[in-house]
């Protein structure tokens, strides 16, 4: 196993697609569609990275990450999923950015790059 990833996106097709690509590449992936489920999944699972859609319907990815960091002592890397251009995204808290629509190659390139770094979050 190459690492444990928590994947959070309220778009089911994107969630399913990214999960499949990462699992085929040897990552263990827990996929959830809400912030509350992400918080539950994070505890005690040794998550190495969170891939989170920053434009979600109820709470934004920014808000969910803020809540997760307040409630968890876990250290993890953060990769943001977004439809908007990088210039329009605050990446102060993120280790990487994955722009939608994405390809298998772009997903693996950013995830492999970020997973090679030390945990800082």
Image (tube, rainbow, N blue to C red):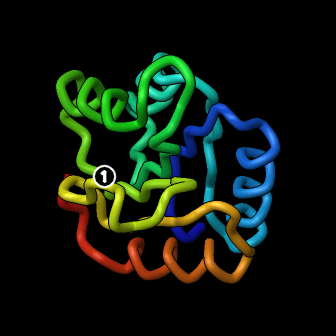
**Relative height, residue 23 to residue 50 (above, below):** below
On the image, the x and y values in percent for residue 51 come to 49, 51
* Residue 78 falls left or right of residue 111: left
- Please determine whether, in this image, residue 26 is positioned above or below residue 93: below
Q: Residue at x 30, y 52 (%)?
A: 76
Task: Please tell me whether residue 42 is drawn above or below residue 107 in the rendered image.
Answer: above
Residue depicted at x 42% and y 30%? 60
Write the residue at 20% across / 52% down: 121
Is 110 rendered above or below residue 54? below
Give the image location of residue 1, x and y in percent. Answer: 60, 67
Q: Residues within 10 Å of mark 1 (few under 14, many from 20)?
A: many
Q: Is residue 41 left or right of residue 115?
A: right
**Residue 74 at x, y percent in the picture:** 25, 40
Q: How many marks?
A: 1
Q: Nearer the viewer, residue 106 or 121?
A: 106
For residue 98, side relative to residue 95 (left or right) = right
Q: Nearer the viewer, residue 4 or 58?
A: 58
Quadrant of residue 114 in the image?
bottom left
Q: Residue tagged by mark 1?
A: 76
| Image location (x, y in percent) of residue 118 | 24, 71
**Mark 1 element type:** loop
Q: Residue at x 27, y 24 (%)?
A: 67
Query: Toward which corner of the image does residue 65 lie, by quadrant?
Result: top left
């Amino acid at each position: 196993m190459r690492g444990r990833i928590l994947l959070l996106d309220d778009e089911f097709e994107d969630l399913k697609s990214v999960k499949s690509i990462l699992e085929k590449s040897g990552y263990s992936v827990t996929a959830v569609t809400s912030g509350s489920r992400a918080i539950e999944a994070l505890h005690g699972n040794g998550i190495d990275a969170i891939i989170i859609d920053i434009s979600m319907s109820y709470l934004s990815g920014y808000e969910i990450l803020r809540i997760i960091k307040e409630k968890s002592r876990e250290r993890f890397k953060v990769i943001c999923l977004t439809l908007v251009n990088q210039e329009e995204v605050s990446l102060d808290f993120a280790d990487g950015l994955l722009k939608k629509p994405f390809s298998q190659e772009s997903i693996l390139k950013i995830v492999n790059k970020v997973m090679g770094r030390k945990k800082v979050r």
